[in-house]
Amino acid sequence: MLFCNGCGMFGLGGPGDVVEQLGYGDKSARVTLEPGETLRLVVRDPGDGGYVFSGTVFDPKVLDLIKVYDEDPETAMLGDFGARHFIFRALRGGETDVVIKIERPGQTPEEYQRQPVTVE
């Protein structure tokens, strides 16, 4: 789900705050931003599989990670571990993929989500 939020209800970015919500295995369409706009990636917490978030990879010349925070589960259902929000600011023209990594304790990190981003 991708939408532009013009009312600033999320606190950062206001008009031009682009939100992309990612579930496990979702194929993400490329997001296009202008310098100064913000991108909020909302990623389901992988805790139900015994995983933890282990890193974020992106081109720091194109995007700046300005905030990360966790959201509590929306339900009390088994397997709902909430979500993590990653907020980026577009810096200058270019392309990058934001890769969210996860791992199980003692294992090698693996790719969980990939979001292609273009800044024009």
Image (cartoon, grey):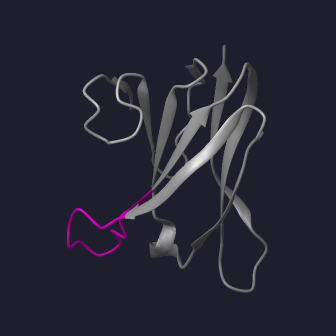
Please check the rendered image and state whether residue 27 is part of the magenta-colored stretch, yes or no.
Answer: no
In terms of image quadrants, where is residue 83? bottom left
Residue drawn at (50%, 32%) of the image: 38
Q: Where is residue 1 drawn, in percent x and y?
A: 39, 32
In the image, residue 68 sits, relative to residue 98, either above or below, namely below
Residue closest to the eye, 13 or 45: 13
In the image, residue 93 sits, relative to residue 65, either above or below, namely above
Residue drawn at (50%, 35%) of the image: 39
* Residue 13 left/right relative to 117: left
Give the total of numbered labels.
0
Residue drawn at (73%, 62%) of the image: 110
In terms of image quadrants, where is residue 8? top left
Residue drawn at (25%, 37%) of the image: 9
Q: Where is residue 79 drawn, in percent x and y?
A: 35, 72
Q: Where is residue 7 drawn, in percent x and y?
A: 25, 27
Residue closest to the eye, 81 or 38: 38
* Outermost residue toward the top in this view: 120
Secondary structure of the magenta portion, mostly?
loop
Residue closest to the eye, 69 or 29: 69
In terms of image quadrants, where is residue 103? bottom right
Question: What's drawn in magenta, residue-wise?
Answer: 71-84
Q: Where is residue 15 drawn, in percent x and y?
A: 36, 22
Image quadrant where one finds the C terminus: top right
* Outermost residue toward the bottom in this view: 106
* Residue 3 left/right relative to 28: left
